[in-house]
Structure formats: structure tokens, C-alpha cells
Amino acid sequence: MALPARKQVQYWSIATVVFAVVLWALGNVLLPFVLGAGIAYLIDPLADRLERWGLSRPQATASITVAAALLFLVMLLIIVPTLIYQLSDLITVLPEAIGNARSYAQTNFPAIFDDQSRIHQTLSALGETLQTKAAVILETALGSAASILNLVVLVVIVPVVSVYLLLDWDRMIARVDMLLPRDHAPILRQLAKEIDAVLASFVRGMGTVCLILGSYYAVALMLVGLNFGLAVGFVAGMVTFIPYLGSLIGGALAIGLALFQFWGAVEIATGDTVTYATDWLRIGIVVVIFVLGQIVEGNYLTPKLVGNSVGLHPVWLLLALSVFGALFGFVGMLVAVPVAAALGVIARFFTSQYMESRLYQGQTHKDAE
């Protein structure tokens, strides 16, 4: 005999509250396991493909682990030192670049720095807000994941968790399926399938888009001669995961650094006189690089790799990142996208149920039939 609907709602509500409290209480302790589960989820299709090619699950897991270790070793020896060097230099150079921009603005747009002007008041308020938010984000990051002990734990535990979960992924999914309530199993399987499709389209697709765009920006900017091309490409690729924000941050950073580096960088010698001119060609090439990147990303990469049926609106994604980041810290930001995808699928399901119900259709629709 099935439980009454009211009892089922009570039990599932209690389970949801308990899960949220546990996630909030454990917080950063769960970080390695959340990362490991995410990596295993992302790599599972590759393991399934290797199985279809004739490898057993342990063999497929071992092959992926060896390949990942070799790739990590190459990055550690070649790419990571250069990236860290450029990022540290970029942090050192940014204050000077901002100071030069301020001096230029003071000379050419003095109204901006008039204490009584509305523009100055607006910019000051915006700057104070950004400083406050940046301090909160930095404090959260330092408190949650940047200590040496936590870093060692991440480096050691995350790969181990990923390997074990990848090895047992199919068995775990089968076990969870066996534990589903029998009356609701078909609906729950359908919802899980839709959630997996959304996550596969968004997380795996956007991860590939971020990798492609980050590599493109890094290589192209280094070929142009931008001093911090690898670091800018890395930053632009990472934040591309958040729609529209990646292009704004990456483009503003690259163009700002190009202006700082190439402004007055060309020597023109005329007899005994040496003058300096701005290298507008390289600045223009930097702008073109980001414009082309956005055209390719918007018209080919995202439609091809992510698809148009993901159902995650950028505003919904930003809201999820903000809410879960505020509630659960860094771990909350990691699970924000999967939870937002799941909630989106569940919301669409309940919307369709509502539109088929008497509450929506009413007595008039029944009489018309």
C-alpha cells in the first residue's frame, strides 16, 4: 500500500532540508569529493566509449588515469610555470596600468574627477562596491581552498576520488536506480535523463568551449606580442563558463593591456629627433582577435557543442551562482550549475503537470470538451 501523497511530500521535504543542512555544515570538507565526482561525471562517457571498443571498465579507467597523469605532468613542466609567472607579473603591472589610465583620464576628461559631478560620484560608488565584493570573494577563497593543507588535500584526494568513482560509476547509478521508490521510478528516471542531458550539453559542452577559446586567445595574443597573452587567455577561457561575462572581462583585460603596452611604443627617428607613436595596428589586432573569438563562439562553438535546448538562461545561471555561493561558499558555486539545471528540469516538469491539471484548465475547458 502506497503512502498518501501528503506523507510523501513531508518525507521528501524533510530529506531535502537535511541534505541542504548537511551541505551547509560540511561545506569545504566536501570540496574534494564534489570535485572528484564532477571529474568522474565528465570523463564517464569516454570510459563508456573505451568499453565499447573492447576494454573492460578497469582497463578503461587505467588508460584514462595514465593519459591524465601524463597530460598533467606536461602541463606542470611546461605550461603552469609560465602561467604562474605571467599571472604574478600581471598582478604587479595592473596598478601601474590603472594609474596611467587615471592620469590620461585626468588630462583629457577632468570632469570625471570633479567631486561634485555625477559621473565621479557614480564611479566612486561603483569602485567601492567592486572593492567590497572583491575582498569578500578573496576572503572566501583564501578561507576555503587556498591554504597549503587544503591544497595538498585537493591535489591528493581529488584524483583518488575521481578514479574510484569512475571505476564504479555504472554500478553506483544502477544501485541508485534500484533504491528509487517503485511508484515514482519511471518519472524519476525520466527527470534524471533530462537532467543528465542538460548537464551533458552545458557542463561538458561549455567546458570544451572554454578550453578551445582559452587556447585560441592565449596563442593568438602571444603571437601578437602581448606580454601576458597566456595569462589573459587563461582568464578569458575560465570565465567564458559564465555567459557574456567571459568576453567582457577577457576583452577588457586584453585591450587594456594592449593600450598599456603599445601606447607610444613605436619609435620614429627623423634626423636627430626621435618621437614615439602608438602602435594602433597591434591594438587593432587584439580587438579583432576577441571579436573573431566571440563570432566563432556565438555562431559555431556554443550551438554545436552546447546546443540550443539547454534551458539555462544566463540570468538564471548568475542567480544560482550568487545564491549558492553566498549560502555554501566555494562548494556552493561548484554545485550551482548542476543544481540550477536540475531545478530547471523539475520546474518545467511541474509546469507541464500544472497546465494539464484542473487547476489550470478549469471547469470551462472541461465543459468545452
Image: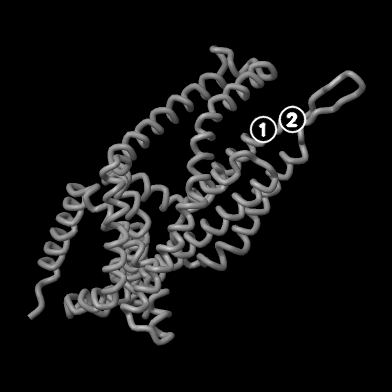
Q: Can I make out residue 340 in this image? A: yes
Where is residue 134 drawn, in percent x and y?
Answer: 41, 33
Query: x%, y% of residue 255?
Result: 64, 38
Circle 2 crowding by C-alpha within 10 Å: few under 14, some 14–19, many from 20: some
What secondary structure is found at the residue carrying circle 1?
helix
Q: Which residue is mark 1?
A: 261
Disc 2 secondary structure class: loop
Image position of 349 with respect to 274: above or below:
below
Note whether 66 is above or below 74 in the view shown. Answer: below
Quadrant of the frame with the N terminus:
bottom left
Taking the image as shown, residue 267 lies to the left or right of residue 359, namely right
Residue 236, position in %: x, y? 54, 47
Q: Residue at x 51, y 51 (%)?
A: 79
Q: Is residue 122 above or below residue 313?
A: above
User: In the picture, which quadrant includes the C terminus?
Assistant: bottom left
Looking at the image, the residue that sits furthest to the bottom is: 54
**Residue 84, x across and y down, in percent:** 48, 42
Residue type highlighted by circle 2: Ala
Q: Position of 280 compared to 136: left or right?
A: right
Q: What residue appears at the point 40 percent right and 65 percent down from the top-left corner?
A: 199
The three-letter amino acid code for the residue at tag 1 is Gln
Quadrant in the picture for residue 116: top right
Residue 188 visible in the snapshot: no
Left of 290 or right of it: where is 192? left
Q: Residue at x 58, y 63 (%)?
A: 301
Q: Nearer the viewer, residue 205 or 339?
A: 205
Q: Which residue is mark 2?
A: 265
Q: Could you tell me if the residues under marks 2 and 1 are in contact, i.e. CB atoms within 8 Å? A: yes
